[in-house]
Structure formats: C-alpha cells, structure tokens
Image (cartoon, rainbow, N blue to C red):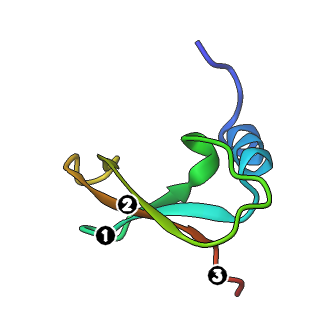
Amino acid sequence: MDDRTEEQKLAEYERRAPGWVVRCLRCGFTEPWGKHGYRIRGRGNFCTITRCSRCSRYCCHRVEKRKEQ
C-alpha cells in the first residue's frame, strides 16, 4: 500500500513534469502529466491516445502546458 498523502503525490507529479497537464478531449478532465511520464524542459503540445480516468474511454488526450491564472 502507498501511505503517501495526496499532496505528496501531487508534489511528486509536479517534479516529474513541472507545469504540464494531460486533458481528455472527450470529457475535459485534466490531471498532472507527471502521473504518466516525465517532461522536463519540453516545448510544444502533443496528443496521446490513452484511457481517461473519468469517462473510462480510449480517446485522444492533449498534453499541454498549464495555463497560468
């Protein structure tokens, strides 16, 4: 079992891919890209086909830089 808190997991994901998120093009769900892979000093956006955590469908997901608020 993983005894880390949710905040610790999110901090680890942010270290793996700072500022990058993956967004489902079908339902709009976003989550940190660091959960799936590493992206350090990356440029540009790209798409990948994977299963969405929310809608559970295989579809295109856009990996993009998080918009600053």
Picture quadrant of residue 66: bottom right
Specify the amino acid type for callout 2.
Answer: His
Q: Regarding mark 2 in the picture, which secondary structure is present there?
A: strand
Q: Which mark is residue 49?
A: none
Residue closest to the far top: 1
Residue 26 image-quadrant placement? bottom left
Task: Residue under label 1, please give it.
Answer: 25
Where is residue 63 shown, x and y percent of the image?
51, 63
Q: Amino acid at mark 1?
A: Leu
Give the CA separation, mark 2 to mark 1: 6 Å
Q: Which residue is mark 2?
A: 61
In the visual, does 46 lie left or right of 67? left
Residue displayed at 31% across by 69% down: 25
Q: Residues within 10 Å of mark 2 (few under 14, many from 20)?
A: many
- Residue at 64% across / 62% down in the picture? 20
- Please report whichever mark, 2 or 3, sits nearer to the chain's N-terminal start: 2
Q: Which of the pair 52/60 is nearer the observer?
A: 60
Mark 3 Cα-neighbour bin, 10 Å: few <14, some 14–19, many ≥20: few
Outermost residue, left side: 57
Circle number at residue 67: 3
Q: Nearer the viewer, residue 40 or 17?
A: 40
Do tag 1 and tag 3 residues touch (Cβ < 8 Å)?
no
Find residue 23 and report its horizontal and vertical position in percent.
43, 65
Figure quadrant of the N terminus: top right
Q: Amino acid at mark 3?
A: Lys
- Mark with earlier residue (1, 3): 1
Residues at badges 2 and 1 in contact (C-beta under 8 Å)? yes
Mark 2 vs mark 3: give the one in front. 2
